[in-house]
Image (cartoon, rainbow, N blue to C red):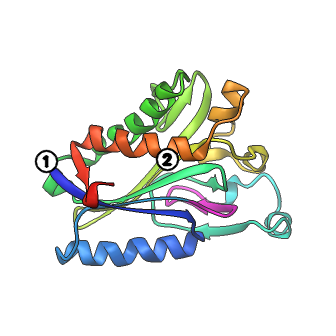
Amino acid sequence: MQIWQLREYAFLEYQEALSLQTKILEKRNRKECKNTVLLLEHPPVFTLGNRGGKEFLQLPEEKIVEKGISIISTRRGGYITYHAPGQLVIYLIVSLQEMKKGIATYIRQLEEVMIQIGEYFQVPTQRHPERPGAWIKNKKIGSVGVSVSKGITMHGLAFNVNLDLNPFSWISPCGFIDVEMTSLEKYKKEAVSMKDVRAVSKQIIANIFNISWENGI
């Protein structure tokens, strides 16, 4: 059983989290650190994937900026998405070679993390037969976006817990014009604690990847 490092934050600006991932990636490539997972939330931000960007905005860019929401390009897979408080973001900087996994298997494991979080909270979360992420029937509750450099991953998943979903209407989420976003709290129609979701997610990740956390976290 491998031991991974866990770093948990309340909030990190997107660029700060990206810089942190890059530094860990460089150390991981030099084998100076263990596989590392970051758990956090972001202030409001739209991020553009390597498959599509500003063409999926449903509002003029200046209107979005006026609302205090940044628009940032990334190298992760996928299209445009939205991050904000109330959404759990999990970044994994891990070696696929050491885990002996291909990227397709790895992405399915990230989806499985979200599916099991949903199941824990009695929300029927599942895969979509044609579209990545985590879904409740035809509504999307979680997204996956990954990049790989020399066999080391960056980015990861974003799971909607109790955030304001309205800004998703200002974009075509993940490049799909017909996607409605949802969250644990919206589906359950009752309050859901982010603290509880974080705690459950750590155990689920450990189980799915068959790892333990450094320092017993």
| Disc marking residue 198 | 2
Can you give x and y, in whole percent of width and height, for residue 15 in the image?
55, 74
- Depicted 92 relative to depicted 126: above or below: below
Label located before the other in sequence (2 or 1): 1
Amino acid type of the residue tagged 1 in the rendering: Met
Q: Residues within 10 Å of mark 2 (few under 14, many from 20)?
A: some
Is residue 178 in view? Answer: no
Stretch in magenta: 41-53
Q: Residues within 10 Å of mark 1 (few under 14, many from 20)?
A: few
Examine the structure image and report whether residue 17 is included in the region drawn in magenta: no
Secondary structure mainly formed by the magenta segment? loop
Measuring 51% from the left and 26% from the top, which residue is drawn there?
Answer: 125
Measuring 42% from the left and 30% from the top, which residue is drawn there?
Answer: 116
On the rendered structure, is 87 left or right of 66? left
Is residue 158 in view? Answer: yes
Can you give x and y, in whole percent of width and height, for residue 27 in the image?
26, 77
Residue wearing tag 1: 1
Find residue 71 and report its image quarter: bottom right
Q: Secondary structure at mark 2?
A: helix
Can you give x and y, in whole percent of width and height, for residue 143 in the image?
52, 44
Q: Secondary structure at mark 1?
A: loop
On the rendered structure, is 84 left or right of 99? right
Find residue 203 and report its image quarter: top left
